[in-house]
Image: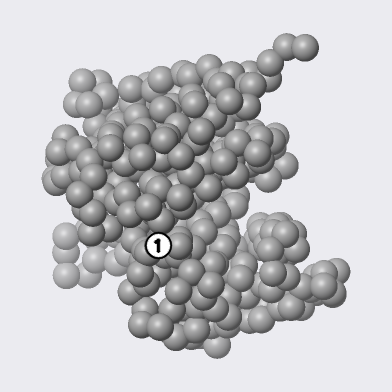
Amino acid sequence: MSQQNYEIAVYPGDGIGPEVTREAIRVLDVVAEQHGFTISKRHLDWGYDYWKQHGQPAPDGFVDSLRDVDAIFLGAVGWPDDMPDHLSLAPLVSIRQAFDQYACIRPARLLPGLTSVLAGKGPDDIDIMVIRENSEGEYIDNGGRFKQGTPDEVAIQTALHTRKGVERILRFGFEQARTRRNHLTMVTKSNAQRYSYVMWDDILEEIKDDYPDVETVRQHCDAAVMNFVRWPERFDVVVASNLFGDLLTDLGGILGGGLGLAPSCNVNPEKRFPSMFEPVHGSAPDIAGQGIANPVAAILSLVMMLDHLGQPAAAKQIQTAVESAIMADHKTTDLGGELSTEQMGDAIISQLD
């Protein structure tokens, strides 16, 4: 019987991206051998250096070059002091749109062995899955600036919400809630935005009875932000628009111990196209090359990738290894420890046996 092979496009990116990606790939190679599957890696040298050489962050036709891979693994992108953010992010936006990666999943979970920034809250209290609508909403490029540079300048940025987009992300959220604690919170702002978020409210009411086993709560975004801090234990699966999900997941990352621990994925749930897996943190050029970046978020993004690819045992092994390493007080400097990026990778690999 032949081994299952997965082709992964590895996009290390900029700043600390290559450093954390290197450790994640080391972990991936170990578990692949242990679980009897193989990984073919397609290295992508796109990003800041490519832009400096070619005037664009990725080559022409880069999206089509990725259509046949099983998944995309990203480190981090951006070099804000020199490269405009909209340029560094452009390839990612194109990938998300072309491959219909409409669900951005960002868990916020405090791991055992870590102390929460919230007094009196522990690992049993902070375990949230935020699902962000990733294909429309406030972040589509819909608008413009007029009379630019004059006293009469006008900027228009229009959000777009579709029934199809809202319904499919809510149904995806309900299905995820069924695999966890059967509770879903939808984040809205219908008290102030009476068209878009009233539609979100209406669609939730229309479909929630299809999931009688899932308790459903609706919260306005400002209340949800407050309650993430006051009562994180009341949240299980949270479904939000592109903008609200973006805000809540950064807060969730801090509640879970910091962005150095926060994984994410941009998925096409139907698996018609490849999905993309990445740590939540940015490229952090200020510490690039120092070997102090925390690779845990990148390594936990592997967990999400392997689950998506149908390798749950390998995913579980990595999750357990990360938790065991942290419980043994193996930590990078952002967590109060002294380990380098590579040493943290070594500590996690040592727990894979």
Which residue bears the numbered disc 1?
Answer: 113
Residue 181, picture quadrant: bottom right
Residue 331 drawn at (x, y percent): 30, 51
Residue 279 drawn at (x, y percent): 41, 46
Is residue 332 rendered to the left or right of residue 200?
left
* Vertical placement of residue 62 versus 351, above or below: above
Label 1 crowding class (10 Å Cα cut-off): few <14, some 14-19, many 20+?
some
* Vertical placement of residue 238 versus 55, above or below: below
Q: Secondary structure at mark 1?
A: loop
Q: Residue at x 37, y 72 (%)?
A: 116
Q: Nearer the viewer, residue 228 or 172?
A: 228
In the picture, the quarter occupied by the N terminus is top right
Residue at the extreme top of the image, as rendered = 2
> Which amino acid does the dot numbered 1 rest on?
Gly
Is residue 252 rendered to the left or right of residue 219?
left
Q: Residue at x 27, y 58 (%)?
A: 335
Residue 315, picture quadrant: top right
Q: Residue at x 40, y 83 (%)?
A: 120
Q: Nearer the viewer, residue 262 or 156?
A: 262
Q: Residue at x 24, y 66 (%)?
A: 153
Is residue 23 rendered to the left or right of residue 29?
left
Q: Nearer the viewer, residue 133 or 275?
A: 275
